[in-house]
Image (cartoon, coloured by chain):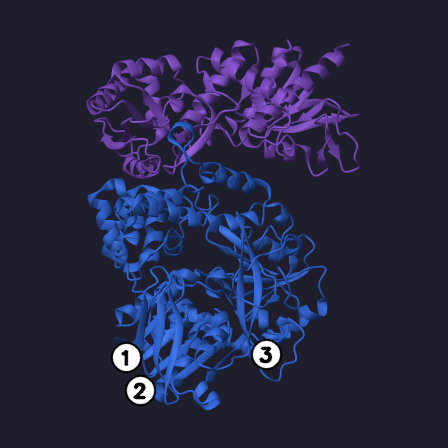
Chain colours: A purple, B blue
Amino acid sequence: MESNHYDVVVVGAGFSGLLAAAASAQQGDKVALVATGPGSFVLGTGWLKAQDIMDSSAPMELGGAIGLFREMTRIAGYPFVGQIQNTHSLPGILGDFQSVALAPEVLWNATPREGASPLVVGIRGLTCFDENFMVERLNEQVLATNSGCKYTARQISFDRDLGIPVTTVRIAKCFDRDPGFRAELTDALQQVASGFDSILVPGVLGLTSTAQQILELEQQVGCPVCETPTLPPSIPGLRLFHHLERYLHTVGVEIYQGFPVEKLEIYDGLCTELRVASPGHALILHGESVVLAAGQSSVSLLGKACTGHDEQMHPLASTGSVMARNLFVAGPLLQSDAGIKGDAMDILMGYRAGNLAAATAVLQLL
Amino acid sequence: MESTQVVIIGGGATGAGILWDLSLRGIPSVLLEQGDIANGATGRCHGLLHSGGRYVVKDPEAARACAVENRIIKAIAPHCVEDIGGLFIHCAQDDPAFFEQWWRAAEAAGIPSNRLSAEEARALEPNLATNILGAFTSEDAHVDVFRLVLANLEAAVRRGGQFHTYSKVKSIQLDGGRVREVHYCDTRTGEEHDIACEFVINAAGAWAETVAELAGAVLPVVSDKGSLLVLNHRLSNRVINRCRKPSDADILVPAGPVCILGTSSIRVPSPEGLSASPEEINQLLHQGDEMIPGLADTRVLRIFCGARPLYVPPATHASGSREISRSFALFDHETRDGIGGFVSIVGGKLTTYRMMAATACDCVAKKLSVHEECTTDKVLLHPAIDRKAHKRAIHVLPLPVAEKIECRLGPEADQVIKEIALRPELAEIVCECELVTRAELEYVLGNSTLVPTQTIADVGRRTRLGFGPCQGTFCGYKAMLAGFQTHRWTATQAANEFSAYLQERWKGQAMVQRGKQVEQLDLSHELYGMTSPVAADCGELNGK
C-alpha cells in the first residue's frame, strides 16, 4: 500500500505528461507517471515547430518550460539546440521547408547552407521515403534562393533481409542492437559520401541512440549525417520520448507503462485513487495531487460531467464547481490561451500543471 | 472532329448505365463527365440499394420499381453489392399507426418482409435501442457506388463505348432545330474539343437544369442537399431504417469497415459548394442515437453532402422536398421544346439507375430506328474471375486481400497478381483499411485500367484507398510517392496533387471535429499543414 503513495501522480506520457512529471520532481516531490505508451511522440517529427511558439503571451513561463525541456534532453545525452525566438529551416516530409525553433543536432544540421552539396540517401525497400522525390522538391525550392545549394539523391541497400516492406522501426532497431548492422550502414554511407559535404537520411538512426553515438557514426563516415522526418512511426519522435523517459528515471520518477488508468475515484472534492487496468489485479495508485495529461483519454476519464477547467487547471463540473481540488488537467480540455499551439503548448501546460500539482501536494502535507 | 451517334452528359450511375445500355444495343456513344466518375449525387449518397420499403407508404409505384431493380442489380453486379438485408425498426418515439400502415402497404406492393418482435430484432442487431417495439425485415443492401459506375463504364468500353472524364460541356450547337455538335473543355488542361452527334442525352443529375439551358430548354429540377456522416465502425450488420414517415437521419448503412448515417433534406439553390452546419450534424447524431444508443459518441470520420436532383412535376405544390416523388421523368425536348435530338432524364434514385437508363435508351433507340431491345437486366456487368486466376491470387496474397482486389478489378486483377508473383515486394499493403496493395495502386495509377485515373482521389474511388480512419494521411502520401515513382507526376506535381487531395479530405473532417478524429486531423495538419519559406541565409521563398 505504502509504496503506491505519491506526492504527484501524472497520467499520460506525451509532452505535457513528461514535463509535468519533471516539473514536480524538480520541486523534490515523489512522482509516479502512468501511461499506456509514448503519447503522440510516435507521430511527431522530433522537433519543435517555430509556429507553435511564436506570439506567446506568457514568455517568462514558456522560457522556464522550454528551459526544463532542454535540461531534460541535455542530461539524457540528446540535447536540443536552437532558440525560442529564432527559426531555422529544415526539410519536411513533403520535401518542403519547415520552420523549426528547437531540434536535436541530428535534425538541426539538415538545414540548407550556401554553396553546399548535400546528399539525400534512400534505403532500398523503405517505401515510405523517396530520395528522388525529396531531392527534386528541395532543389526546386533552394534554386529560387540563389544559394547555390544543390541536393543529390543516392540509394543504398543491405544484403540482410529487412522484411517487406522495410520499415523505419526495423532499421532503427537493427541500428540500436546490432553493431554489425551499424558497420554495414557506415560502409554504405562512406561509399556514397565522397564528394558531398553532408548526408541526409530518413529518420532511422536508432530508437535509443544518443548524440554521442550519432557523432561516432559521423566520424566514421567522415561528414555530418542528418535525418529528415518520415511518415509515422517517427523514429526521431520515439527517440526523444526514450531520452525524456530516461531523464525521469535519473531523477527518481517511477514509471508505470503499458496500461491505461480506467477510473479516478473522486470523493468529497478530492481525487483519492487511480485504478490502473493492469493484468491480473488492478493496480491502485494514490497521489496527493494528480495531473491528467492523457489527451482525449483525460476527457473520457472525467466523463461528461466535466465541462471545462478553471485558471488553476482544475476540471469543472457543469455546475461550475471544481470537480477535485487536487486534480489538474493539461491537455485537450484547455484551449490555447497562451497564444501558442502544438507541442510547445503541451510543454508549457505540462510544466504549469506539474508545478501547480507540486505546490498543492506540499500544501496538503502541511 | 470527333464524331459519334449519341453524346451522354453526366458520369453518375444513370449516365454510365446509359452508355452501357447503348453500347449493348450497338449504338456508338460517348459520355462526358465534368469531374471524375460518380462526381455528383451518385458518389455522395448512402450507397443504399433500396428494397422499396422506404417509399412503400407514400409512393408505392417508386417502391415497386425499387424492389424490381434491387433484385436485378444484385444479379447483374454481385461484386458491387454487400447483400446484407435490412430492418425497419419501430422506435418507441414513433407513431405505431405508421408501423401498421407500412406492413399493409408492403404486402399490397408485394415487397417481401417478415415481422419480428423487439427481442428477435435485437438478437439480430444487438446495438439497437432496448425500447424498440418491433421490426420488419427487408431486402436492402449496400452497393459500392464507385464500383457500380466503373463496372458500367468498363462493360461499355468493352463493347466500344467511350467516355471522357474531366470534360465539361460548354455548349450544345443546334442546326435547324436539331442537336448537331457538343463543345466541351478538358477541365485539367483547358483544351477545347467538339463532338459531332445526332443525339444528346442529358443525365447530369443536379446539373441537368444547367445542361438543358445550353440547348435552350428549361427543366423543373431542384437540388436537395443531403448530409451524411461516416462512422468509424459497423454499428450494425444490416441496413437499419427507422419505420416512420421519412425524415432526417433515419437510415444507417454498413459499408465495408465503416457505416454511413443520413440524411438531412434541405433545399439548396445550387449543387455546388455544399457544407453542413453544426446544428445539422448534431441533429443527425441525436436522431441516429435514438436508433442505436451510443451512436452519437462514436468516432465520426467525416461528413459529406450531396445534392439530390429532384424532379418537380408541374402539378405538385409540395411544401418540402420530402413530398416530391423520388421517381424519375424522361423529357423528349423535341415534342416539349422543339429541340430535336435532345432528351433529359431527371429525378430517380441510385437503385433505379438502370431502369432510368433503359427508359432513356428505349426512347433514343426508337428515334434512331434501332430495334435492339434493352438487355441490361440480363447481362452480367463484370465477368467473374476464373478459378485458375483465383488460385494464382491466393497463392501470392492472403485471402481477404485477394478477394478485395478481385472484386475491385475483376478479370484485370490477374495482371496485378502476375506482377506480384514476379516481384513479391509489390504485395506491400499501402492502405491498411481497404487492403490495397502497392501492385494495385501502381496498376491504377499507371492507367492500365479501362477507366483512367487523374488524381489521388480518383485512386480512392477505384480502390477505396483513403476511405478509412486515416482519411488518406498515410496512404495518400504513399499514393503520391507511387505517382512520382511511376513517372505519372513530377515531384512538385505530386506534392501539389497530394495537397489538393488533403484539402478535400480535411474539409469533410473539419466540419465534424469530435473525439478521436480531432487527433487524427491534428496529426494530418501537423505532418503536412504548414510549409514555410526557407529562412535566414537562404532568403525568401514564395508560396506557403
Q: Tags 3 and 2 in contact by the CB under 8 Å rule?
A: no
Q: Specify the quadrant that holds the N terminus of chain A.
A: top right
Q: What residue lies at 27% left-to-right and 37% top-to-bottom?
A: A132
Q: Is residue B320 visible?
A: yes
Q: Tags 2 and 1 in contact by the CB under 8 Å rule?
A: yes
Badge 1: residue crowd in 10 Å (few <14, some 14–19, many ≥20): some
Q: Is residue A272 above or below residue B287?
A: above
Q: Amino acid at mark 1?
A: Gly
Residue at disc 3, secondary structure: helix
Q: Amino acid at mark 2?
A: Val
Q: Which mark is residue A165?
A: none
Q: Where does residue A103 sit, x and y in percent of width and height?
A: 45, 23
Please report whichever mark, 3 or 2, sits nearer to the chain's N-terminal start. Answer: 3
Q: What residue lies at 29% left-to-right and 65% top-to-bottom?
A: B383
Residue at disc 2, secondary structure: loop
Identify the subunit bearing mark 3: B
